[in-house]
Image (cartoon, grey):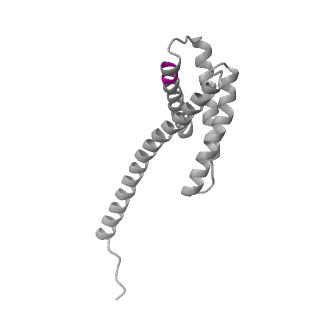
Amino acid sequence: MKYITLWVRRYVTVYGIIMLCTFFMCLLFNPASELPVVTFFGRIMVFTLIALLSLAVYYSKEELTVKAWWVRTVLHLLLLEAVLLPLAHAWGFWQSGTDILVYAGFILLAKALWHLVDYSLNAKTAAQINEKIRENRLEKKSERNANPRPGNN
């Protein structure tokens, strides 16, 4: 259940980031645009699912080194661009050469926002874990002080 909650939270976060980027992209580059709401929201839901599935490039049985994390981050960005740009073009989200640059830039922005949000969530979780570790150490230390081992006299 914990993993389902995590993925639902991630889905909502990524969906929100995509919607924010879409809002600003339309505001800055096509303020007069009118979107078919149901179709648009459905397509953004598919975009979000693809973005989450693409996170599989980070999967590892071992902890990633900093270098491995950066390699996977670049690979993930390239994967997102390679999959989302053609899909967005097929759905009519962009038409010209300039549009593709703008769209690619917003995908990069969305990825950067994701990392900021994900980092802040991970930092919060790490702080909670570190606090539990400190509490356990203090508890064990107080137990050892309360029940000293017999000496080897």
Residue 146 in the image, given as x and y percentages of width and height: 29, 68
Which residue corresponds to the image point at 40% horizontal and 45% vertical from the top-left? Answer: 124
Given residues 25 and 129, the one toward you in this image is 25
The answer to whether residue 63 is seen in the rendering is: no
Which residue corresponds to the image point at 42% horizontal and 51% vertical from the top-left? Answer: 129
Q: In this view, does 40 lie above or below 6?
A: above
Residue 142 sits in quarter: bottom left
Magenta residues, as a range? Answer: 23-27
The answer to whether residue 70 is seen in the rendering is: yes
Residue 82 in the image, given as x and y percentages of width and height: 68, 35
Q: Would residue 25 be counted in the magenta stretch? A: yes
Q: Is residue 80 left or right of residue 123?
A: right
Given residues 15 and 131, the one toward you in this image is 15
Quarter placement of the C terminus: bottom left
Quarter placement of the N terminus: top right
Q: Would residue 151 be counted in the magenta stretch? A: no
Q: Is residue 9 above or below residue 89?
A: below
Residue 86 sits in quarter: top right
